Image: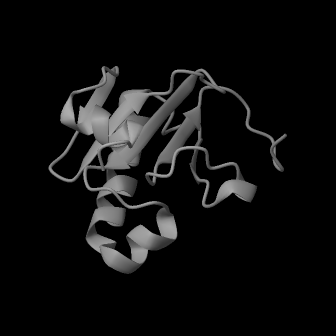
Amino acid sequence: MTDCLFCKIVSGDVPAEIVRESERAVAFRDINPQAPTHVLVIPREHHPNAAALAAADPASLAAVVNLAQEVAVDEDVAGKGYRIVFNTGPEAGQTVFHVHAHVLGGRGLNWPPG
């Protein structure tokens, strides 16, 4: 999509601090981190949210989650614990409508959030 910020990151038209890539997904640092480790993982193809991606391309959803796990290992939070969050829809806090997983870690993450 020509007006999608994350599609522009995938295409290289918008810069981002890429931390890891795979054939199907890209991981980059969040510009407004909510934890010491806050990386976004997105599929290369545009899908508006996690539900749409799961319905259209389960293999890409698996690739996003797999890359999120690799990021957690790279960021040294896998052993201590980390969170993978998909916000789906505006009431859940989704603000960019290209599905993305937040990989959060590096401090205690109490539940419920907020």
Total count of labels: 0
Outermost residue to the bottom: 55
Name the image quarter holding the C terminus. top right
Given residues 59 and 71, the one toward you in this image is 59
Residue lying at 59% horizontally and 20% vertically, measured from the top left: 36
Outermost residue to the left: 23
Residue lying at 30% horizontally and 26% vertically, measured from the top left: 18
| Residue 29 in which image quadrant | top left
Given residues 53 and 2, the one toward you in this image is 2
Is 82 left, or right, of 78 in this rendering?
Answer: right
Residue lying at 53% horizontally and 42% vertically, measured from the top left: 102
Image color mode: one colour
Given residues 75 and 112, the one toward you in this image is 112
In the rendered image of this protein, does residue 109 appear above or below residue 58? above
| Residue 66 in which image quadrant | bottom left
Residue lying at 54% horizontally and 29% vertically, measured from the top left: 38
User: Residue 13, position in %: x, y?
Assistant: 24, 27
User: Residue 86, position in %: x, y?
Assistant: 56, 55
In the rendered image of this protein, does residue 4 appear above or below residue 49? above
